[in-house]
Amino acid sequence: MQKIADGNDCDFTLIGRDVVFELLSHSIDGQTLLISDLRPETSDLKLSIPLLGSHQVENAAVAYAALKTSGLNVPDEAIQQGFSELKWPARFDIVRRDPPVVIDVAHNRESALRLRQTLDDFFPNIPVVLLFCTLEDKDISGMLEELSPRLERVVATQADHPRAPSAEWIADQVKKVHLPVEVVTPTAAALERALELAGEQKLVLTAGSVAFAGEVSGAWQKRNR
C-alpha cells in the first residue's frame, strides 16, 4: 500500500507506526482509548466510544487518522464529542442486559470471529442461543465454526429478503457443523422461540446479515412497545 500511495503522490499513514493507540478502559457501557499521533505538530488525544469490541478500538484509530489527514480543520474537542456520541446500530448492540439480548450484523468469518471474541470479553460464561439467518452467498460454515464454541443451540429462520434462503436450508448448514438446530418462521416467531429457549440464564444472539439484523431489531422494538 505504501508503493501505491507513493505512485499516486499521496500521503500514507500507517496505524501502529504513525498513529498508535492504547485501550485505557472498557465496560459494557463503552471503551476509552488514548491515541498518540507520532506525526509532527500533533498531540495525544483521549477518545471514548460507546461501541464494544477490540476491533472497534482499532476502527476508531483508523477513523481518527483519516479525519486528521482529510484537510478538515476539526478541533480535538469536536472529535471527542463526535466519537462519544457515535451510534452504529446492530454492532454488538445489547438491547437488553438481563438476561442479555445482543443483535449483531456479523456476516462473514472474520466478523463472526470478532463477535465471538467480544462475547468472550463481556459475557464469558453465559450459554448462547443463536437466532440465525444469512444470505445464500455468505460463508455460512465459516461463520458457524467461529461462533460454535459459544453456542448451545441455533434457531434458524428466513428473513424477508430476496436472497434469503429457506429456514430449512439454513438449518441443514447448521447441522453440518454439528450444532443442534430448530426451524421457526417468520423472524418475529423465531425471536420469541430463541427467548423461550434462553430463559433467564442464557444469552440470545442474532447474526447473519445486515438485513436480518434490521428485521430482528424491528421485531424486538415491536414486542417491547
Image (cartoon, rainbow, N blue to C red):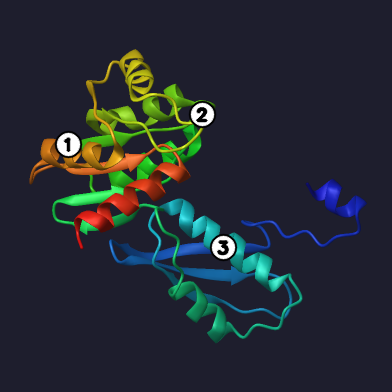
Please name whichever residue, 59 or 168, is drawn nearer the observer in this view of the structure.
Answer: 168
- Asked if residue 132 is positioned above or below residue 199 in the image, the reply reads above
What residue is drawn where x is 30% and y is 39%? Answer: 187
Look at the numbered discs 2 and 3 and tell me whether their residues touch, using CB distance below 8 Å: no
Q: Which mark is residue 138?
A: 2
Q: Position of 187 compared to 50: left or right?
A: left
The label on residue 193 is 1
The quarter of the image holding the C terminus is bottom left
Q: In this image, 189 relative to 173: left or right?
A: left
Q: Label 3 sits on what residue type?
A: Ala
- Image point (45%, 61%), residue name: 88
Could you give the CA–CA distance between mark 1 and mark 2, rounded to whole angstroms? Answer: 24 Å
At 39% from the left edge and 53% from the top edge, which residue is drawn?
Answer: 90
Marks 1 and 2 close (CB-CB < 8 Å):
no
Per the image, label 2 sits on a secondary structure element best described as loop
- Horizontal and vertical percent position of residue 51: 40, 61
Q: Position of residue 175 (x, y in %)?
A: 31, 15
Query: How many numbered marks are there?
Result: 3
Looking at the picture, which amino acid does disc 1 mark? Arg
The residue tagged 3 is: 61
- Residue 116, how many percent across, how many down? 35, 40
Compare marks 1 and 2 and give the one earlier in the sequence. 2
Q: Is residue 185 toward the left or the right of residue 76 in the image?
A: left
Residue type at the position of mark 2: Lys
Question: Mark 1: which secondary structure?
Answer: helix
C-alpha distance separating marks 1 and 3:
39 Å
Nearer to us: label 2 or label 3: 2
Q: Nearer the viewer, mark 1 or mark 2?
A: 1
Mark 2 and mark 3: Cα distance apart in space:
28 Å
Around disc 3, counting alpha carbons within 10 Å, would you say few (fewer than 14), some (14 to 19), or many (20 or more)? many
First in sequence, mark 2 or 3: give its number: 3
Tell which tag, 1 or 3, sits nearer the viewer: 1
